[in-house]
Image: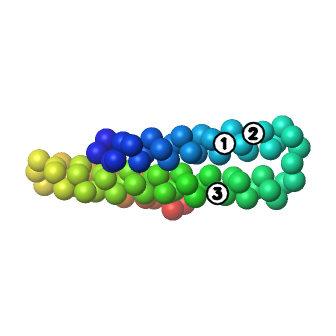
Amino acid sequence: MMADTQKVTRLLKTARGQLDGILKMVEDDRYCIDISQQIMATEALLNKLNKEILSAHLKHCVQCAANDHEREEKINEFISTLDRILK
């Protein structure tokens, strides 16, 4: 992986903390809307993390592909991933 490992790790740890917080909210029988808002905040953070990783993929993996065939494969992988994200 060519993304900034420290940044990715920090974002993942933050998301893990948010998920732990959501679990505690559920266990404490907190208000549904409050739980939903925390879930949306976690989703936004994970989307930011995914953008970071996909950006690094484009900047390194696709750009540094050894030949046209490999580059095309990397681009197709990227497009396939975007299709799953945008469903």
Amino acid type of the residue tagged 2 in the rendering? Leu
- Residue at left 69%, top 38%? 20
Instruction: Give the residue type at disc 3.
Output: Ala
Give neighbour class at mark 1: few <14, some 14-19, many 20+ (Cα, 10 Å): some
Distance of mark 2 from mark 3, alpha carbons?
14 Å
> Where residue 54 appears, x then y in whole percent?
37, 54
**Residue 38 visible in the snapshot:** yes
Residue 47 vs residue 51: left or right?
right
Could you say where residue 47 lies in the image, as x and y percent from the top left?
52, 56
47 vs 30, left or right, is left
Dot 2, crowdedness within 10 Å: few (<14), some or many (≥20)?
A: few
Q: Is residue 73 left or right of residue 66?
A: right
Q: Which residue is mark 2?
A: 23
The single residue placed furthest to the left in the displayed view is: 67
Indicate whether 18 appears above or below 43.
Answer: above
Mark 2–mark 3 contact, CB under 8 Å?
no
Dot 2: what SS?
Answer: helix
Residue annotated with mark 3: 41
Q: Residue tagged by mark 1?
A: 19
Q: Residue at x 48, y 44 (%)?
A: 10
